[in-house]
Amino acid sequence: MRHAVVVLLCVAAACSHGEERVKTGTADSPQQGTSGIAGVADAGTAPTGAERSGGLTGVAEHPRSRQPVEVDKASQPPQSAASAENVHVLALPATQKPLVTIALRFTSGALDDPRGKAGLTALAARVMAEGGTQALDAKSLLVALFPLATSIDARVDKELTTFAATVHRDNLEKLLPILVDVVTRPRWDPREFERLREASVIDVEKRLRQGDDENLGKETLHEVMYRGHPYGRLVEGHVTDLKSINLDELKAHAAKVFTVDRLTVGVSGGYPQGLPERVAAAVAALPRGATAQREVPQQRPQRPRFLLVEKEAEASAISCGFPWPLSRRDDDWPALSIARSAFGEHRQFNGRLMQRLREQRGLNYGDYAYIEHFEQAGGNAATAQLGRGRHQQDFTIWVRPVQNENRLFALRTALYELSRTLDAEPFGQEEVDQTKAFLDGYILLFDQTDARKLGYALDGDFLGTNDFLRGWRSALRGVSAGDVNNAWKKWIKPDQIQCVMVGPRMEEAKRVLLSDAETPMHYQPDAQGNVPQKPAELLESDRAVNRFSFGARGDQDVAIVPVEKMFE
């Protein structure tokens, strides 16, 4: 019944979801293509971080904000009439909606960080977006954006960096020169550089290591899975590396990776005629790169099987996974997406993990699985994982923090339930049909805004998956339960899984992992202090979980690291 209600709501919410065309090509000779893919930044919130500059005390207008971008001759180097022709443009058809989204997407990311300088690309993008332009210092930049009800978002991932803003079309002419200047004429103020570098260090040292155990576990797993791989360093950087970066290095790196040959200009929403070409002409003065982005090799699973991060905490965070070569273009993608959803759709209650860890046992807040890289950041992240296109992907399981007395039982249960999907309890026809019905409506929520549509179009352009959402949704209908189980068995390799646990008393946890000792489930008492009687079948399942091996092969398969060493 829950599935039926969700589907009806999804279909109703997406009743205006229609077929759209994308204009893509160079600025002066666009080509027509199709799009089914959604957004970069959702619209119109006031910029964050004002407190860093002492608050907003007035309204500053950009000196050039009343002029169209293409006639701004004074502040940019001269360019020939043909200089914008080599700028790649991807423009969705203009709509009647009042918001306009502009995205400047570079095929540059943490992959480009030199050895010993993890976080260089992310810091460069942050200083560009927050540190001011040649025309506006950092505070004036905030003051100028505030009345426009927008902000300039810089999203950096492994292979992509996107500078994007969504604004009401009445304010478009004021935003344009500011956005262009952020990318082409950053201020590189030494004081702002010092401030933002220190803020980045604090973000890793304090926020991630001390105040965000969920993401600490997930990011640690990522470095474990990708050890020795170009993906194997935190996008935000390592503490020692960040502290070693100087302003000259930052400027030189930005000039190397934010180049016109790596740039795609994206536009969507209710924009005026000629806007894509105007933006392309305005950014065409960016330098041309001397080197291409690094190749992304396929990563193979490796050891240790368990990495335990020692940290004082009331609960333990758990993340497991392994890298794999699956892509959205793979024929098995639709079937795997059904299996993933049935096993553990993000923040949905239909998955086996959610039902058996949270609902039946009350272990934690949520338990999910993913067939490609996932980040939770913001209210729309579950349905708009945008600007994070990657050529190497991974399968992961996320067990949200669990009371320490039950953490090993929760980990064991997640591994046990995954194992059962491959033999004792494959996905049944009814389960598959219900999941397909859920996804048929749920996917319609992914690109509800023009900003999201643009984000999916840019990702599709990068990955070669145009019309991804429409194609995915259409392909689901022809998938059988047999297809789902065959694909799942083909791709899921439980013996390759690596797990990270963040919490206290890790020597004790290591002994249990190596010995496969029993990990009893401690059910919580009610308000009167009594533990409610549990169904016999649940208690039998608990016993079966405790007979399941963690799979550690020896001492070398369980490593312990103090939290202070992570990302140092």
Image (tube, grey):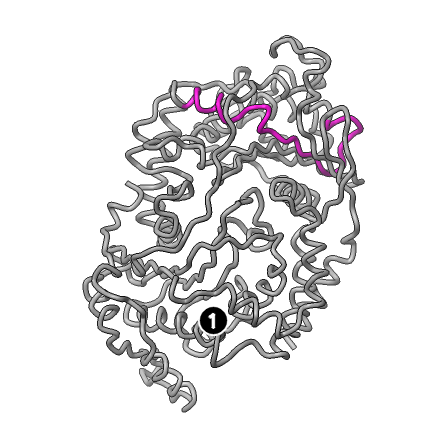
Using the image, determine if residue 156 lies above or below residue 338: above
Residue in the picture at 55% in, 44% down: 389
Q: Residue at x 47, y 24 (%)?
A: 254
Relative placement, left or right, of 273 versus 426 is right
Figure quadrant of residue 283: top right
- Image position of 278 with respect to 435: above or below: above
User: In the image shown, does 526 or 105 lie closer to the viewer?
Assistant: 105
Residue 294 left/right relative to 553: right
* Quarter of the rendering containing residue 43: top right
Q: Quadrant of residue 433?
A: bottom right
- Image coordinates for residue 230, horizontal then vertical, percent: 41, 40
Residue beneath disc 1 = 353
Boundaries of the magenta span = 250-276
Asked whether 132 falls inside the magenta stretch, the response is no
In the rendered image, the quadrant that contains the C terminus is top left
Q: Residue at x 50, y 27 (%)?
A: 257
**Structural crowding at the residue carrying mark 1, measured as other residues with C-alpha within 10 Å and reported as few (<14), some (14–19) or many (≥20):** many
**Residue 253 in the image, given as x and y percentages of width and height:** 44, 24
Is residue 391 placed above or below 536 in the rendered structure? above
Determine the secondary structure under disc 1: helix
Which percent across, then down, holds residue 146? 58, 31
Q: Is residue 152 visible?
A: no
279 and 466: which one is in front? 466
Left or right: residue 170 versus residue 295 is right
User: Split into 4 quadrants, where in the image is the N terminus?
Assistant: bottom right
Residue type of the residue flagged with mark 1? Leu
- Between 222 and 14, the one nearer to me in the picture: 222
